[in-house]
Amino acid sequence: MRFEPQIQRRYEAEHSTKRLASLRANIVVGLVFYNMYNLTAITLMPDILWLSVFLRLGLVTSISVLIAWVLGALSPARREQLVLFGVMNAYLIPAFMFWLTQAPLGNYSFGELPLHLMFGNMLLALRFRYALVFTGFCFITATVVAVLKSDVSPALELAFVLQSLTACTFAIYANYQIERRRCLDYLNSLQARLNSAEARRAEQHYRDLSLTDPLTGLMNRRALDQQIQALIDASTPVALLMIDVDYFKSLNDTEGHTRGDDILASLANCLKNVASRFQETHAGHVSCARFGGEEFVVMADIERLDSARLARDIVNAIRAAAIPHPARPDALNILTVSIGVACMTPQLTMQPIDLLVSADTALYEAKRLGRDRIVSADTADALESAA
């Protein structure tokens, strides 16, 4: 009963610390009761009482404490193997003393052996493959000492063997149930977490889709409103550039809508590149969005002077791209844009629409003045033009 290697590594990464703490605590508990059997040795095996004390307290307890200490430095597989070694070592001592004692009540000490078996398989919860090894070891050892002990009659030997077989069967079955439940619980938990993560990814994917323009990959109008509101709530300076492609309708009519869509996508990439370069040299975050049709918005938490530089960078980058526009009435023959700039310091009463209206008013003025230019508006909508 084992996980696939990849799942096993994940399980150990998540549960190794807990498993280590459990093993150490159970080793301590086991040693307490293990040494309490020195008290029963007074009655059951007084002839080897001091040997019992030495082997239990001096040998097994010392080895077990050392094992508990070094477990944390071992790999998960080595850790489980060392625990198996420790519990087999602990089992050998009472089995050996049962065989050795010649006290009248010494045969009753056989009852201690199934308790060690239960401790290893159920309290320590040895991993199933190690539990199989431990259970087989215990049955063989118990059978050998019962048969070889000189003062045990054949009928009692059979009784001891049957008792040992029954204890081994119950113990390994209990361990199987424990291990099966551990594995199934983890697999169910892992599946639930993976399903939850997948659901969150799907939710995030659809949320991103709802906030993204499918043609350009930029933010859409809904995302833009949220971004503006976030800046307003943060009470930071806000600069908004409303950008319109000059004579786009004539380009669409002449070149076709497919060509028009390609140009809009190219323009979006140009805006993203300018925004990225601007962020590298200026303080502030720059966001790009498609407002609708051939209109775009670039928004940043920057002051008025920087907003003018950003607008000029955009105009110059689009001119430098030299995207053909043969349908222009002014015979310029390349794509250009007009930009309206609005800069505001957010106030409690401001709404996103206020900033958009101000930038749109400045854009209208830029188009009225002949296009291919930048017009800036302040909060009072006083306009100044800039080439």
Image: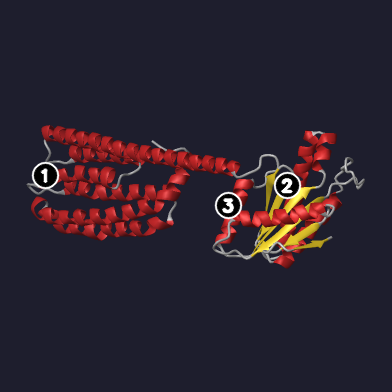
Task: Determine whether, in the image, residue 195 is placed left or right of residue 35.
Answer: right
- Tell me residue 269's x, y (percent): 75, 48
Q: Which residue is mark 2?
A: 295
Kind of residue at badge 2 = Glu
Question: How far separated are the C-alphas under marks 3 and 2?
Answer: 18 Å
**Can see residue 274?**
no
Kind of residue at badge 3 = Gln
For the rendered model, the colour scheme is secondary structure
The label number, if any, that marks residue 226 in the structure image: 3
Question: How far separated are the C-alphas under marks 1 and 2?
Answer: 94 Å
Precedes in sequence: disc 1 or disc 2: 1
Q: Quadrant of the N terminus?
A: top left
Question: How far separated are the C-alphas under marks 1 and 3?
Answer: 80 Å
Tell me what residue is drawn at x 40 percent, y 57 percent.
72
Kind of residue at badge 1 = Tyr
Of 86 and 249, nearer the camera is 249
Q: Quadrant of residue 174?
A: top left
- Tell me residue 212's x, y (percent): 63, 44
- Tell me residue 186's x, y (percent): 39, 41
Secondary structure, mark 3, is helix
Task: Determine whether, in the image, residue 26 is placed left or right of residue 300.
Answer: left
Precedes in sequence: disc 1 or disc 3: 1
Of 176 and 350, nearer the camera is 350
Secondary structure, mark 2, is strand
The label number, if any, that marks residue 108 in the structure image: 1
Q: Are marks 3 and 2 in contact (CB under 8 Å)?
A: no
- Tell me residue 304's x, y (percent): 71, 66
Residue closest to the far right:
331
Of 7 and 372, nearer the camera is 372
**Does residue 91 lie above or below 275 as drawn?**
above
